[in-house]
Every structure is written in structure tokens, then in C-alpha cells.
Image (tube, rainbow, N blue to C red):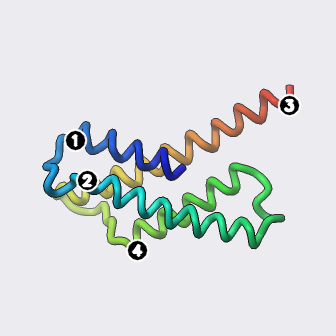
Amino acid sequence: MSILNFLLCIVTLSVLNLPGGTFGMFPFLILAECCITTVIAFITVLFFKRNYDSVGKIAVLFEIIYLTSLIISGFYPFGRDDDSLVSLLMYLNSGIVLFLIYFGNQIISSKGKS
């Protein structure tokens, strides 16, 4: 999920054609934030192994921690400037990644059962 968030951030910023001086290193900020989120989620899963027995539950855990870290980092999507637009798209990107992981897992697990 971290890599998908990073790649989707790169695609989003390249489509928007925002100034590189302002948003050039932005995907790497997202990558660093995703790495921190991954470590926190991994430690949480290690402590609570019985509760996180599926990919879907782990994906939701990652999403909750990631959204919390976005809020703490100051990604506020409410406003009219480019920063707010990028923040809104980062929240949208994380929802898309959760959708891809969750339903991709559902498709793979349904093929395994049949």
C-alpha cells in the first residue's frame, strides 16, 4: 500500500502540472510518511496477531493509521489553493489504494475457494 500511495502521488502531481519548486519533493514526503505508517502498522499486527488475520483487516488498519498521519502532518483539504487540492487528492488516492487492495484481495480469495 505504501508503494501504491507513492506511485499514485507521482501520477497525480504529474497530471496536475504543479510547480516543481513547490511540489517537487512531495511524493518523497508521502513515501516517508507511508514508511512510518507501515512500521507502525507492522508493529500493531505483531502485537495483535489474532485480530488481524486477513489482508482486508490489515489494509483497513494501514488506512486508519495513514489518514491519521496525514491529518497530523497538516494535510488539510479544505481551501482553494494548490496545497488544499493536493491534500484532497492525497486523501482520494489513499481511498483508491484501499479499494484496490481490498477488492483485489476479495477477487484473489474467491478464485482460491472455487
Mark 3 or 2 closer to N-term? 2
Nearer the viewer's eye, disc 2 or disc 1?
1
Q: CA distance from mark 3 to mark 2?
A: 42 Å
Q: Tags 4 and 3 in contact by the CB under 8 Å rule? A: no
Q: Nearer the viewer, residue 41 or 57?
A: 41
> Which residue in the structure is indicated by mark 1?
16
What residue is rendered at 60% in x and 43% in y? 101
**Horizontal placement of 32 versus 101: left or right?**
left
Judging by the rendered image, the residue that carries numbered circle 2 is 85
Tag 2, which secondary structure?
helix
Instruction: Give the mark, 2 or 4, whose residue is nearer the N terminus.
Output: 4
Residue at image position (54%, 66%) is 65
- Numbered marks: total: 4
Identity, as a three-letter code, of the amino acid under mark 1: Leu
Position in image of residue 66 (x %, y %): 50, 62
Q: Which mark is residue 113?
A: 3
